[in-house]
Image (spheres, rainbow, N blue to C red):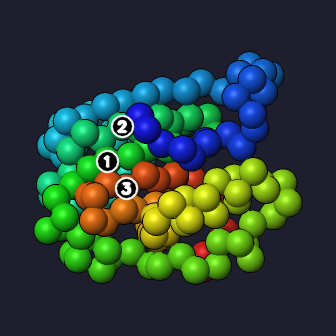
Amino acid sequence: MHSRLNLFPFPAGLNKLFRRAVNIQIEASRALTLPEAHELHLFDQGWLPNILPPSTHHLHLVKSPKINFAQGEFFFSHDDWQAFSARLEPEKAIEKTMEESIVSWAKSLRKMQGDGHTLWHYRADYRHWMFFCKEDEGHCEFVMWVCRDAGK
């Protein structure tokens, strides 16, 4: 995966220590096509929203079931961008909503914006996905988290 997002906003060496200290298991899944992602039950289990473009391919997902977080990326045909983005909300308030405890993650987000990614949000029930897309390249990176009382 070429993602520059960091599922755990700590330097790489501390990530290993942090995961060991709190016993966080990380699982990875790869799917070459959208039907293959369905066969892996990534949608049924709530790791992916049912709005991904039909042309989605080369999907990679890293998830931590214990803390309900996931990170990944996928590619798609540029022709599917309009229909896909119509189901997303533009994310304009990233910097204003970040808390100090996740400053390094906020810096990553600003860097991605500076690199030409557009930021989008999608919510289904208590699951949230933040997409970082380069629509001209047909590529999105994303993070997913669970927040049962936010976004009402």
Please report whichever mark, 1 or 2, sits nearer to the chain's N-terminal start. Answer: 2
In 3D space, how far apart are the residues under numbered discs 3 and 1 (Cα atoms)?
6 Å
The residue indicated by pointer 2 is: 60
Question: 138 or 85: which is nearer to us?
Answer: 138
Q: Is residue 30 visible to the viewer in this orientation of the structure?
A: yes
- For badge 1, the amino acid type reads Phe
In 3D space, how far apart are the residues under numbered discs 1 and 2 (Cα atoms)?
6 Å
- For badge 3, the amino acid type reads Cys
Question: 80 or 42: which is nearer to us?
Answer: 80
What percent of the width, then of the height, locates residue 74? Answer: 31, 47
Above or below, 50 against 26 in this view is below
Residue at (56%, 65%) from the top-left corner? 114
Residue at disc 3, secondary structure:
strand
Residue at disc 2, secondary structure:
strand
The N terminus, quarter of image: top left
Q: Tell me the mark number nearer the camera, choosing from 3 and 2.
A: 3
Please report whichever mark, 3 or 1, sits nearer to the chain's N-terminal start. Answer: 1
Q: Is residue 146 visible to the viewer in this orientation of the structure?
A: no
* In this rendering, position of residue 142 left or right of residue 14: left
* In this rendering, position of residue 97 left or right of residue 142: right
The residue indicated by pointer 3 is: 140
* In this rendering, position of residue 46 left or right of residue 99: left
Above or below, 129 against 66 in this view is below
Q: Farthest residue toward the right?
A: 100
What percent of the width, then of the height, locates residue 27? Answer: 48, 26
What percent of the width, then of the height, locates residue 2? Answer: 43, 38
Residue at (75%, 23%) from the top-left corner? 13
Q: Farthest residue toward the front?
A: 115
Question: Contact (CB < 8 A) between labels 3 and 1?
Answer: yes
The residue indicated by pointer 1 is: 74
Residue at (21%, 75%) from the top-left corner? 83
